[in-house]
């Protein structure tokens, strides 16, 4: 287990370097000259050249990339925003709690509604509840999130006036619509995954055994069946979080949530590339750590994976030993 | 959806099939034919398929059936409510919304398909190579894709399209890049399951080249899961296209792309909500049809999965 965690942690280094490379590459091919952005397009050419030299923009791509990575690692320096002149990291960190809150709530809501719905649908297969759940799930994956948000806004904010249409500064009520918007697609996905995995588990022999020995039905379902059927749900958790994070970016723009997504979209419109690059790098690195956490969590939920990993390692080690032996043998025979 | 084809129905089907064979000894049977038979019995999948075909027909004959010119401004008649004259009303420039929606099918649907075909062509090749050669090739390809997958797809698509700028080509490119790892994984997984079969072994023994083994023997047999995920991927691509256009990063006004129409109408939510209603419904119906059809294909190709 320790070896697995260490391996997984070490693998984070190339992942993060790669993610930073993607962010750096994208903003370096972005249109517009950073010097023009800072000095203004009609500054004298000599000043521009001096600035360019000072910023190191004339260096080769990988030198600039190296400097960028070193800046992040040593000083947490994601560059300064063209627009405000402030360090991008500082601005992002002040906005990240909102994005985090929205994403986490959306994932929680999806899990807390999706899993029970899936369980009920599976236990009462082909019942009204099952059909309703599946129709709802199909709706969830088919409705465009942003349109659903607009329709909710129309009904609950414009017509009924129950909920505010703008999140910032409206307290807890302001979060209802954005969380509902981001959550809806995943409720459906999770309900479907839970249902099909429950249906498979419920037909296993150990469930029949549990029932045969007179275990209470509630315990059979929640202790024996649900625990085992949660593994595929946990496997899709990464996707759920990815889509919630993506959805949050759009939700932020619809409901004016003051988060990293809105910050990035505004930066895109203002061609403020350090801010775009910083937002992308920040969210991607956070997401990589979330994925790492899920992977580790996954081995806790399903210990079989750990065994599989160890077995694979053992196999590879055996193979290496066999190869080494063969090499030595051939060398020995060559010498003889 | 999955549920319509029950084990009891499957039993009846098997009996019917047996009886049919007895009646007509020359009756042909092949996996494809069997799958089609199962698909035909799935009513929701057939509804999805019919809606899909209708949408494609509308996209083809669109310019000849639109009641009004979709670009024509009519300032006398802006934001008209739905009526006999304008079935879905008009927008803030007085353009007929129905006509614009019909022309919109000519954008969302083909672009959605294009995105997925391109993603499968590139990602699929990578996945197939990884699965076929295994070892170091597999490791390098999958690790690079791992890195790409560390950026949530929507974030990646937004970043790419932000840098490249709007327009159809850049939009397709952004969706292809963001969905590449997922497509590669699907193809890799299905090739891996096929690879161990004896007929591959015998093809190799007969001296088939690597390319021939891959294209002639593995790919056709690995097509099931790929086909299933194809329809779902088109649904996702159409949703992504409209989302990007909605936040102003994909296809923009005056092109009547559905997401762009919603984007242009979002300020009218208090005064003329009908402008927002219909484009969203159009997206939802298209995506719903694709999902129903995709569910049907999945159940038909693999009756065990339900």
Image: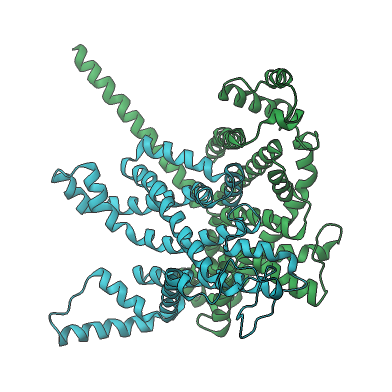
Chain colours: A green, B cyan
Picture coordinates of residue A133, whole percent (x, y): 58, 76
Note whether B205 is above or below B270 in the view shown: above
Task: From the viewer's side, name the closer residue of B141 and B278.
Answer: B278
Task: From the viewer's side, name the closer residue of A231 and A16.
Answer: A16
Note whether A222 is above or below A238 in the view shown: below
Q: Residue at x 50, y 82 (%)?
A: A126
Q: Residue at x 50, y 42 (%)?
A: B146
Among the 4 quarters of the image, the one containing residue B31: bottom left
Q: Is residue A292 left or right of residue A323?
A: right
Q: Is residue B70 left or right of residue B228?
A: right
Number of labels in the image equals 0
Q: Is residue A304 visible?
A: yes
Q: Is residue A104 left or right of residue A318?
A: right
Note whether B1 is above or below A317 in the view shown: below
Which quarter of the rendering shows the C terminus of chain A?
Answer: top left
Q: Is residue A120 left or right of residue A180?
A: left
Picture coordinates of residue A324, whole percent (x, y): 32, 25
Among the 4 quarters of the image, the one containing residue A138: bottom right
Task: From the viewer's side, name the closer residue of B120 and A76.
Answer: B120
Task: From the viewer's side, name the closer residue of A95 and A298.
Answer: A95
Q: Which residue is farthest top?
A: A335
Q: Residue at x 62, y 24 (%)?
A: A64
Picture coordinates of residue B35, whole percent (x, y): 31, 72
Q: Is residue A215 visible?
A: no
Q: Residue at x 43, y 70 (%)?
A: B56
Which quarter of the rendering shows the N terminus of chain A?
Answer: top right
Picture coordinates of residue A14, whole percent (x, y): 55, 33
């Amino acid at each position: 287990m320790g070896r697995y965690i260490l391996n997984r942690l070490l693998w984070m280094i190339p992942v993060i370097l790669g993610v930073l490379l993607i962010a750096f590459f994208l903003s370096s091919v972005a249109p517009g000259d950073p010097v023009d952005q800072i000095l203004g397009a009609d500054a004298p050419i000599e000043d521009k050249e001096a600035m360019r030299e000072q910023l190191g923009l004339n260096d080769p791509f990988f030198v600039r990339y190296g400097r960028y990575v070193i800046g992040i690692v040593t000083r947490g320096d994601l560059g300064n925003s063209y627009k405000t002149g402030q360090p991008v990291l500082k601005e992002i960190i002040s906005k990240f709690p909102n994005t985090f809150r929205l994403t986490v709530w959306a994932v929680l809501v999806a899990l807390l509604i999706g899993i029970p719905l899936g369980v009920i649908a599976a236990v009462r297969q082909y019942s009204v509840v099952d059909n309703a759940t599946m129709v709802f799930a199909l709706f969830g994956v088919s409705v465009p999130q942003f349109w659903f948000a607009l329709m909710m806004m129309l009904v609950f904010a414009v017509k009924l006036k129950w909920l505010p249409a703008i999140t910032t500064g409206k307290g807890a009520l302001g979060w209802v619509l954005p969380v509902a918007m981001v959550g809806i697609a995943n409720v459906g996905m999770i309900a479907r995954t839970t249902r099909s995995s429950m249906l498979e588990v419920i037909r296993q022999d150990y469930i029949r055994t549990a029932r045969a020995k007179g275990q209470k039905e509630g315990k059979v379902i929640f202790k024996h069946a649900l625990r085992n059927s949660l593994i595929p749900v946990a496997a899709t958790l990464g996707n759920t979080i990815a889509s919630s994070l993506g959805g949050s970016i759009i939700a932020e723009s619809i409901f004016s949530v003051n988060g990293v997504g809105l910050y990035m979209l505004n930066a895109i419109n203002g061609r403020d590339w350090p801010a775009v690059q910083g937002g992308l790098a920040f969210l991607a690195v956070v997401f990589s750590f979330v994925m790492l956490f899920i992977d580790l969590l996954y081995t806790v939920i399903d210990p079989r994976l750990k065994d599989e990993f160890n077995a694979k390692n053992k196999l590879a080690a055996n193979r290496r030993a066999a190869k080494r032996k063969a090499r030595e043998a051939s060398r020995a025979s060559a010498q003889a | 959806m999955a549920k319509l084809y029950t084990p009891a129905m499957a039993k009846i089907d098997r009996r019917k099939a047996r009886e049919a064979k007895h009646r007509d000894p020359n009756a042909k049977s092949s996996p494809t034919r069997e799958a089609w038979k199962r698909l035909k019995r799935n009513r929701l999948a057939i509804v999805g398929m019919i809606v899909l075909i209708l949408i494609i027909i509308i996209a083809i004959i669109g310019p000849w059936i639109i009641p009004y010119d979709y670009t024509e401004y009519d300032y006398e008649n802006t934001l008209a409510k739905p009526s006999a004259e304008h079935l879905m009303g008009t927008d803030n420039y007085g353009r007929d919304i129905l006509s614009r929606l019909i022309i919109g099918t000519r954008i969302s649907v083909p672009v959605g398909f294009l995105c997925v075909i391109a993603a499968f062509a590139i990602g699929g090749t990578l996945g197939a190579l990884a699965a076929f050669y295994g070892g170091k090739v597999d490791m390098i390809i999958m690790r690079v894709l791992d890195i790409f997958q560390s950026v949530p797809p929507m974030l990646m698509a937004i970043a790419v399209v932000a840098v490249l700028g709007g327009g159809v080509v850049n939009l397709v490119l952004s969706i292809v890049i963001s969905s590449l790892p997922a497509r590669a994984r699907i193809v890799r997984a299905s090739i891996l399951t096929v690879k161990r079969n004896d007929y591959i072994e015998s093809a190799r023994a007969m001296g088939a080249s690597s390319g021939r083994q891959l294209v002639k023997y593995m790919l056709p047999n690995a097509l099931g899961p790929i086909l299933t995920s194809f329809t779902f991927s088109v649904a996702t691509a159409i949703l992504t296209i409209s989302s990007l256009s909605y936040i102003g990063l994909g296809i923009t006004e005056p092109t009547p792309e559905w997401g762009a129409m919603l984007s242009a109408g979002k300020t009218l939510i208090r005064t003329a909500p009908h402008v927002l209603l219909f484009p969203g419904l159009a997206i939802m119906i298209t995506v719903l049809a694709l999902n129903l059809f995709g569910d049907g294909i999945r159940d038909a190709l693999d009756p065990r999965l339900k």
